[in-house]
Image: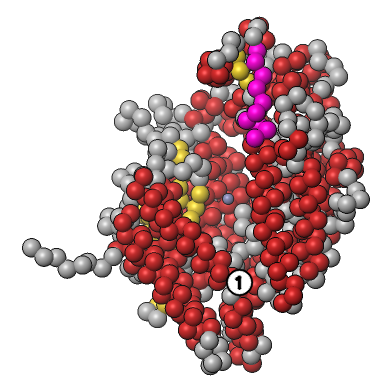
Amino acid sequence: MTTTQAPSPLLESIGLPRFDAIRPEHVEPAVRSLLEALGATVARLQDDPAAPTWDNFVQPIEDDGERLGRAWGVAAHMHSVMDTPEWREAYNAMLPEVTRFYAELGQNLKLFEKYKSIRNSAAFAGLSPARQRIIENELRGFRLSGAELPDDQKPRFQAIQEEMAGLGAKFSENILDATNAYAHIVSVESELAGLPADVITAAREAAEKAGVEGWKFGLKMPSYLPVLQYADSRALRETLYRAYATRAAEVDNGYSKPEWDNGPLIKQILALRAEEARMLGYRHFADVSLVPKMADTPEQVLGFLRELAAKAKPFAERDLAELQAFAKDELGLAPLEPWDVAYVSEKLRIARYAFSEQEVKEYFPEPKVLDGLFKVVERLYQVRIQADSGPVWHPDVRFFRIERDGELIGQFYLDLYARDTKKGGAWMDSAITRRRIPGGIETPVAYLVCNFPGPVGGKPATFSHDDVITLFHEAGHGLHHLLTRVDDLAVSGIHGVEWDAVELPSQFMENFCWEWDVVRDMTAHMDTGAPLPRELFDKMLAAKNFQSGMQTVRQLEFSLFDLLLHMDFDPAHQHVMDLLAEVRREVAVLTPPEWHRFPNSFSHIFAGGYAAGYYSYKWAEVLSADAFAAFEESGRPKGSVLDAETGERFWNEILAVGGSRPALESFKAFRGREPQVDALLRHSGMVAAS
Ligand code: ZN
């Protein structure tokens, strides 16, 4: 029997992905043909003598880009959730080609010229604000990649990028090498007092593996953290603390090698960033970093951080005083040393808020939690969430649809349980992004993926409160993607949203997990069906805010240090540790020993994407807390934070507009004013007693 070649299910660009038919062997031919198609379109358009317009230039590139993005998105998704050897191979085989293709697209100066001429054409003013923003975003991306530099400066700019990539990679490798090189052998059993049994077993096994007597400890988190938290031996804690604090530094700590010292790398990275900023015409790198972000200027961010620090510091001082008193009175530890802080904190936390995570878990069976989440969404936005049908990649995956007044708004997959073939963590990703197509509107589809424990022994899965928060967080990203009303892909849903604003809708949703009304309705004890007792909830709430003052000023210390380092700091003439000391004098309550080399392992800013952007964590928290406060203000007097009127406004002004306008504008349209830090302070228990 002869068969004709069936069209590849991965090439279908209408409707839901055909997870029942798509196989790893479809990836290479489909992605390659889509790469070729997009490449051909770009090649044709970049040399087209006709004046570029949205319709003859932007739209065809977007259409072909969408087809490629959709097929590649499915491959990437399968690689994350069904990481079999076949899928891994299929994905990795095409990854370099896809990466290279997009990198070249971003450097294509002919395209840059086309976008510029649309920007300068009379027709630009007639484009929708969303389309204007897409053009501006494209231009900005090209400019920040050095597209507008004079030709004689471009090689240097390129060299800086490559050198920085290499330095960032070396920075991480040094930390990893130092972390792996260290070992501390405990040979007397009494030294292990206080440590959990599984940690002791792991240390024993590590020693056996290394062929030594005793127990082996190291600087990787599963070994280091329990020692600092639980080991009664102050000497053991101090030994590991010193080793950890001096990783990848010039300090002689007995195990480091000079070639692992990140100190010189820090200087080089800072100097290169400053040079890059000057070439692009900016004062410093902090200016460059903020161009695509929500915050306007580094000065504005400094003001924000300092205001928050001034308000949080008294609470941090109170936290520290309590800790010192407890250490002295209950544990005989005075003065409190840096290697005592985690240990004493853990003892104080247990003394104050002891409750069992296991007990809490029994109140959160999955059906009740999902039902609770859906009810929150349905009440806030006056929508219906119902089970839907469609092909899925695993029998555990469920599929739902969101409707309003019978009209389909979007759909989402829910893949909740941990599997050997699933990447760790939790995330939301887009399967289909809303946009207008010739036949009408293509509705969005989202993946919500978690790694929760599955059902055991025929009973429904039960979740920890942290799991529930994670689920709400990802659902928040999902709603941002699904409730968009933007018609143009590049700024629809989460696309084109500023990096420091993208966590607003997700962190916003977390707040509902701390609302008694909501929590009561989504809990039912596994055996008795009773809701979570109020007393237990109050303990959870108190534990949540434990040491929030100290934690806040610590985050602010890192944020301020990061920002100032990328402003007027001169790495050739000033010392990084001096700047850190200055920042600590301003905001910190705990000062580590002078041999501590925190910057040498600050990978977020030297080897990750957070340079002059570490503030984003707190920034997004402030936004989400302040947004939630609008629901408290309008809803509480009516009896519930689940206020549909405010929900409608949140949808219209924040979720619906996605990246089609600046996030600050969206926030102000929703809140009627600039963001304020008060709500975050209040939610964290940092309110002055009146
Ligand atoms: Zn998130």
Magenta residues (range): 177-186
Residue 567 sits in quarter: bottom right
**Would you place residue 535 above or below residue 553 in this image?**
above
34 falls in the magenta region: no
User: Which residue is painted at 89% across and 42% down in the image?
Assistant: 578
Which residue type carries mark 1? Gln
Q: Is residue 439 left or right of residue 289?
A: left
Q: Is residue 73 left or right of residue 154?
A: left
Q: Within 8 Å: ligand 1 and the Cβ of disc 1?
A: no
Q: Quadrant of the N terminus?
A: bottom left
Find residue 507 and report its horizontal and vertical position in percent: 61, 50
Find residue 179 and report its horizontal and vertical position in percent: 66, 32
Q: Is residue 445 left or right of residue 257?
A: left
**Would you place residue 39 above or below residue 283 in this image?**
below
User: Which residue is painted at 61% across and 64% down in the image?
Assistant: 497
**Residue 241 in view (yes/no):** no
184 falls in the magenta region: yes
Residue 111 sits in quarter: bottom right
**Would you place residue 166 above or below residue 682 in this image?**
below
User: Which residue is painted at 53% across and 83% down in the image?
Assistant: 46
User: Which residue is painted at 85% across and 17% down in the image?
Assistant: 334
Q: Callout 1: helix, strand or loop? A: helix
Instruction: Name the foreground residue: 674 vs 256.
Output: 256
Instruction: Name the foreground residue: 249 vs 318.
Output: 249
Q: Which residue is mark 1?
A: 107
Find residue 301 and report its horizontal and vertical position in percent: 79, 57
- Extreme residue in the left direction: 1
